[in-house]
Amino acid sequence: MSAGGYTRIPGSASLSTKRRGASAVEPVLASGRASLARVDIAVDGRMLSVGRAVLHGRSIPLLVDVVDRVAPLLEPEELAVYLHLYRLAFADDKNVCRVSRAELSRRTRLPDRRLGKAIAGVVQKGHVLLVDRDRDGTLYRVLLPAEVLDESGPQARAPRSAAMSSSTAPSGPLAAPLAAPLAAPLAAPLAAPLAAATTPPQEPAPVTLTRAPRSVGDVCAWFAAVHGGGPGRTGADVAATVLELLEVGYTFARIPGLLDTFVARSPKTTPLRDLPQVLGLAG
């Protein structure tokens, strides 16, 4: 129920604001963690026992820093994805989990497009890394708060610079155009569907990369530095587009060239979600 944009909270109207320290549950709030203090209190016509609680059943440790320091860095839907990946990984005493998009969608109740953007967000922000993919789903490396916040020292931060395992790093002939500093445009090595395009693309400005991109974050940082942002081309939009291209088989070595050509062919107001149509990759 809402009136004038305000949503009424059930039971709120019956609460009266007490002076500090006057609540019947104050002894419980003031007690230490080991205290057995409990108090019975009437709430909405029911008697409730308030105080010490001991959980029973299967559980996993949820670090306080996950809620206090990591959660504020994420949008609500990104947090939902992170928490489910956290549960799937650490419930089995691992920092990785393999899960399909369909299963994540079922768990988070997010439709595919919003789920993709949420996954892109946690990857771009460095909370999760993509390791590999098979028919059972994507293997995610879930970072703990100390890793997300770069508080684990240089040895723990090293994998973040590598970002991807050797199995997903660019290799073979497609990686060559992006190896070492480049003097030529990245748009040259385009995918097969682009070779058949009737209108030749405008050549993008030369781009220099110190190494081939090996993660979604690498591509996002490169795109922001070279092409900037704007509506439909934010970091989350870039990450979502990169993830979709990876899903259909493009490599990290090929993706910057596709992005370069998209920027050259389309007005600045064209959102990145239109890349398949602009480049003729749809279907």
Image: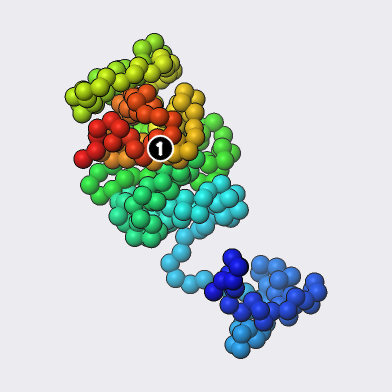
Q: Which color scheme is applied?
A: rainbow
SS at badge 1: loop
Q: Is residue 239 visible?
A: no
Residue at 56% over, 34% down = 153
Residue 184 makes an appearance in the image: yes
Residue 46 found in image quarter: bottom right
Residue 98 placed where, x, y %?
32, 49
Residue labelled with disc 1: 271
- Left or right: where 126 falls relative to 68: left
Is the residue 239 above or below the residue 20 in the image? above
Q: Is residue 13 above or below residue 187?
A: below
- Considering depth in this image, is 276 or 3 the residue closer to the camera? 3
- Which of the 4 image quadrants contains residue 260? top left
Q: Quadrant of the N terminus?
A: bottom right
Question: Where is 252 relative to 178, above or below?
Answer: below
Q: Where in the figure is residue 53, as x and y percent of width and height?
A: 58, 73
Q: How many marks?
A: 1
Give the residue at x 34% y 38%: 274
Mark 1 surroundings: few (<14), some (14-19) or many (≥20) residues within 10 A: some
- Using the image as rendered, state which of residue 210 and residue 272 is in the foreground: 272
Which residue is depicted at the point 46% across and 44% down? Answer: 122
Q: Nearer the viewer, residue 117 or 181?
A: 117
Residue at 39% across, 27% down: 263
Picture quarter containing residue 12?
bottom right
Q: Quadrant of the C terminus?
A: top left
- Estimate the x, y position of residue 187 in percent, counting from the top left: 32, 20
**216 relative to 260, above or below:** below
Is 116 left or right of 40, judged from the image as shown? left
Amino acid type of disc 1? Pro
- Residue 156 left/right relative to 27: left
Image coordinates for residue 245, horizontal then vertical, percent: 30, 36
